[in-house]
């Protein structure tokens, strides 16, 4: 399994907590509200993606009245990684105590899928929620995508600022920069949506005999040319955007307005699915994400107190999918003992006020 040890220092309400995981493939984090369970998951989320589950601000991630935080994790192949933040210096990252040239190089080394109570927003929420889902998935597995996305967003922000200040020529220059990265963003989003749809369809075929489920990528482009040439499409987007900007509409086309549509039996989940169907749809998205990320080394699945939102049938469906997944599963909850008999190789940490109070095993942990 990927992670054998995780250490949090002055992170959220953990002054210093060391989780000796050993060879466990399932880790339970049990305790009352405020015990620091989600903070453990958030530390892993931060190391995998560069952003926290609940906050993007480092000052909110560190323990109150401290100067920073540190997260260390080790893989079973002996590699050790660290993410450190100090208010005076910012973030730094290390591999076996050797500092990376940029802390962003840490992203993608640990791959992460996170299931949360609000995942239904993947179905019900605005298109930006689904774009963010794609971006987090692709950024973990493709550094080129992550770099292209960062450059595109930076140019988009600068173009918007220039246009607001009526610097139209400068805005045009930034728009030109954007189309250098747009083709790759379109290409990879198209690929990953097809991959997700393929996995979801296979799961649905096995589980739901009366339901077909598919995912569709709807790029925000004037028209789809056949054969698809994302370079030409990106150039067309730029030309069309310039015309709309003259009418006061900022960037009608481009990755910033892409959409992903989930359908069951040809019907859109978002508009016509029941709450139960939407929760199943969100679970399928996350499990499909997990399947893609598990093709690399060091994949963890974070489950943050989601079972209370599910009926018994959907809960058992999720537990079955988690049990059959390839990643190391970290489950946080107030009553995790009801799930322990589902796994053979587990370790449980009882938490209280940011401290580890008790550790129990399945009996076969080394």
Image (tube, rainbow, N blue to C red):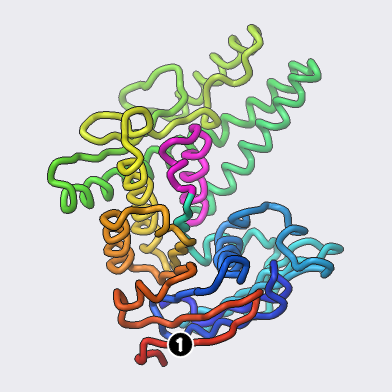
Residue at the outermost left position = 209
Identify which residue is drawn at 64% across, 58% down: 104
| Mark 1 closeness class: few <14, some 14–19, many ≥20 residues within 10 Å | few
Residue 123, image x and y in percent?
41, 38
Residue position for label 1: 360
Q: Quadrant of the C terminus?
A: bottom left
- Image quarter where the N terminus lies is bottom left
Given residues 183 and 5, the one toward you in this image is 5
- Pinpoint residue 137: horizontal percent, then vertical percent: 47, 51
| 192 relative position to 214: left or right | right
Residue farthest right in this picture: 88
Q: Is residue 96 above or below residue 280?
A: below
Magenta range: 118-140
Rendered location of residue 355, percent (x, y)? 64, 80
Taken as a whole, is the magenta stretch helix, strand or loop?
A: helix
Q: Is residue 26 left or right of residue 107?
A: left
């Amino acid at each position: 399994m990927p992670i054998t040890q995780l250490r949090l220092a002055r992170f959220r309400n953990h002054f210093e907590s060391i989780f000796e995981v050993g060879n466990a493939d399932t880790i339970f984090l049990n305790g009352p509200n405020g015990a620091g369970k989600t903070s453990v998951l958030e530390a892993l989320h931060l190391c995998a993606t560069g952003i926290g589950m609940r906050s993007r601000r480092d000052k909110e991630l560190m323990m109150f009245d401290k100067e920073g935080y540190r997260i260390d994790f080790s893989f079973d192949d002996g590699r050790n990684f660290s993410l450190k933040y100090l208010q005076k210096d910012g973030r730094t990252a290390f591999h076996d105590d050797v500092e990376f040239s940029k802390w962003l190089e840490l992203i993608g080394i640990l791959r992460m899928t996170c299931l949360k109570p609000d995942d239904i927003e993947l179905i019900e929420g605005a298109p930006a929620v689904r774009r963010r889902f794609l971006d987090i998935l692709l950024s973990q597995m493709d550094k080129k995508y992550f770099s292209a996305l960062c450059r595109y967003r930076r140019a988009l922000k600068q173009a918007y600022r220039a246009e607001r200040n009526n610097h139209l020529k400068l805005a045009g220059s930034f728009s030109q920069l954007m189309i250098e990265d747009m083709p790759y963003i379109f290409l990879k989003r198209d690929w990953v949506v097809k991959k997700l749809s393929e996995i979801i369809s296979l799961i649905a075929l096995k589980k739901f005999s009366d339901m077909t489920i598919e995912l569709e990528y709807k790029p925000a482009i004037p028209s789809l040319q056949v054969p698809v040439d994302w370079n030409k499409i990106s150039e067309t987007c730029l030309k069309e955007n310039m015309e709309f900007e003259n009418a006061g509409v900022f960037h009608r086309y481009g990755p910033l307005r892409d959409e992903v549509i989930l359908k069951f039996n040809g019907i859109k989940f978002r508009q016509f699915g029941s709450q139960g169907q939407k929760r199943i749809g969100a679970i399928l998205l996350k499990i499909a994400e997990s399947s893609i990320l598990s093709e690399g080394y060091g994949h963890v699945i974070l489950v943050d107190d989601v079972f209370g939102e599910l009926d018994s049938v959907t809960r058992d469906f999720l537990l079955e999918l988690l049990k059959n997944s390839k990643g190391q599963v970290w489950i946080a909850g107030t009553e995790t003992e009801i799930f322990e008999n589902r796994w053979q190789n587990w370790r449980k940490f009882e938490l209280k006020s940011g401290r580890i109070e008790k550790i129990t095993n399945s009996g076969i942990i080394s």
